[in-house]
Amino acid sequence: MPILSPIGRRHPRVRALYATIYTVLILGAATMIYPFLIMLSGSTKSSVDLKDFDAVPRFLFDDLTLYRKHVEGLFNESVELLNAAYDTDFSSFETVAPPPDATPAILTDDWREFLQTQKLPDYACGCGYLHTPLSRTIPSALRQFRQLLGERYGNDVEAVNRALGSDFTGWNGFFVLPENFLHRIAKPSETLFARAFAEFKIRQPSWMLYYFSVEGFYKKMFLKTQYTRDIEEYNRLHETHYPSYRTLHLTPTVPDGTPLERKDWEDFVRNTLNLLWIRIDPRAKPFYRQYLKAKYIDIARLNRSYQTAYPSFDRIPLKEEVPAGGLALSDWESFIAGWKDPDTQTLHFVPTSMLRIHGVDFMFRDYLQEKYGDIHRLNQKAGTAFAGFDEVLPPQYEAHYQDFLDQRGALRREFVTRNYRAVLDYMVFHGRGVYNTIVYCSLAVFFALLINPLAAYAMSRYRMPSTYKVLLFLMLTMAFPPMVTQIPVFLMLREFNLLNTFAALLLPGLANGYSIFLLKGFFDSLPRELYESAAMDGAGEWTMFWHITMRLSTPILSVIALSAFIAAYTNFMFALLICQDEKMWTLMVWLYELQQRSGQAVMYASLIVAAIPTFILFIFCQKIILRGIVVPVEK
């Protein structure tokens, strides 16, 4: 009979009470669901949107947030590379905005045609989605390159090391540092691994590549660091009248401007710009030979150092481009920067008029000049007002944005799954964490369903005088947290030479006091007549234990099995202490190691992945769990 009759439920106060109860329940559910949604949303974040605490990731419906995440991944989380390539002044990826609509579409098409028809050197571009120093996850290009090498060398990282001269400790230690061939310090590598990556890079689609802009680097990292971002300061010191830095352009040879402009250009080329973008006029050959003669004095000494056989200094050639490496590269660099003779104090260097910058910017301008012939023809077709080809900037900012609009669906899928792929890749490729966890949990459940029921059956069946004391002792073990016994257990296992074995993980928790107490109470509630009848029919103790006791105890045994699984699956500190060999680490230990080397979003993803097995168990076993809780109470 219900507490409230149907008529009583119609009373306004009763209805208000019901509404209050349901409101409180809904609010209580929201307080549980909302934090989970925050963590689920956080597992898809990167450094650009990590501070957004949204229950639904904003990039799923906001193109601006998605674009910022894409640009962050494209430039490998380097704002410096972004500003140099786009000739912009973004302070962070959070402030990145789409390009204005000022660039004509014909220029963007010319840029794409230029990239397809011109054979650019490998160092002209860098690969995006390769490195995440802030988000600390595994981006798509790195996954693809690793998969390519894995397929080529049979998923054996040692075979990769032998073939390519690398020294990776494992697939999860595999990395490729992004290229930045703008600073003087960066030099292309000639290793087999670098060649393999170069082959991989040139096959990537255009929306995953960025091209190095020497002009953008000159303005962003050279001029603005000296004269601030205010063009007025630059104009005042240089006696010029540029409206903005965007209207200031780098020339391939020394400019015909003010002395300070010439000095800036010369300092940039001699001391800052990467040697890959510098060319020396062949007319500088006499100066180069004079420099080598002053440095080595004797041609025999130079031949020993260069391992050559030049008959005299007058026969030494001068390379227009930077040499591949060795002492020739060092001398070529010193000839550009300037070398002072320690004896005569004479400074030897290539004349400034014989230096030239050879970059993608100038190659694109040469391509336009060759295609259109005259700047007026380009202006007519594009609707622009350029005074000369030297004012045209490569529109990769606009081209990248157009590519982004076409790739929005793929990018959303990538960002939703990227951190989870990092977690799964780590668990699959790194050690035996999954295998060890399956074996450990299976054995823990098996022994929990064997040892505990046998002990409880003995105490329930035979009514020993010391049963109460034994149960009290078993219950007292629950008063001490596991951390108290870890050190004594570790010392004992070490004495028995059981460390780094499954036995070390299983033996300390083989018998559980609470499980025995719970099973003993449940066994006591079973009808004694069943055992008497079975004994009269000739059944032995094992038969009665297995066919009567165990068959009638399915609910409580399910609870014991579930508790044993959760205890084994979530065992972290004890597993780390007892099994210090990586080959015996369980999944929890591996995920802990992953969290130490990964970002916050990957950590959220790892927690969600780790919760999936227990969540599935509770979904499919909830009826058995409820029966295991209710039935002992009713008995």
Image: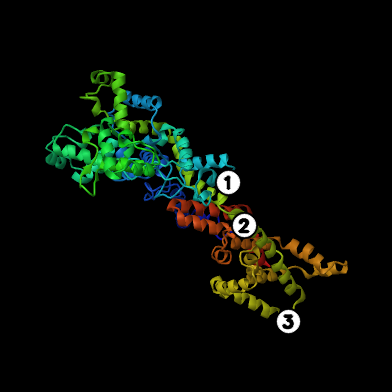
Q: Which residue corresponds to the image point at 59% horizontal and 52% vertical from the top-left?
A: 616
Q: Nearer the viewer, residue 221 or 191?
A: 191
User: Which residue is identified by label 1?
Assistant: 156
Disc 3 secondary structure class: loop
Q: What is the quadrant of residue 202 in the picture?
A: top left
Q: Which mark is residue 220?
A: none
Q: Residue at x 73, y 74 (%)?
A: 459
Query: Which quarter of the figure has residue 23?
Result: bottom left
Q: Nearer the viewer, residue 392 or 370?
A: 370
The residue most toward the right is 537
SS type, badge 1: loop
Give how far apart the Cα atoms at labels 3 and 2 are: 42 Å
The kind of residue tagged 1 is Asp
Q: Mark 1, mark 3: which one is toward the viewer?
A: 1
Where residue 22 appears, as percent x and y from the top left, is 48, 55
Residue visible at 58% across and 44% down in the picture: 155
Give the residue pinned by disc 3.
465
Label 2: state its secondary structure. helix
Q: Amino acid at mark 3?
A: Pro
Query: Quick check: 373 left or right of 474?
Result: left
Seen from the viewer's position, the closer of residues 442 and 283 is 283
Q: Which mark is residue 436?
A: 2
Of callouts 1 and 2, the N-terminal one:
1
N-term-proximal mark, 1 vs 3: 1
Sequence order check, earlier mark of 3 and 2:
2
Q: Quadrant of the C terminus?
A: bottom right
3 or 2: mark nearer the eye: 2
Above or below, 484 against 7 in this view is below
User: In the rendered view, does 98 fall on the left or right side of 592?
Assistant: left
Do residues under tags 1 and 3 come within 8 Å of each other at their CB atoms? Answer: no
* Mark 1 → mark 3, Cα distance in angstroms: 63 Å
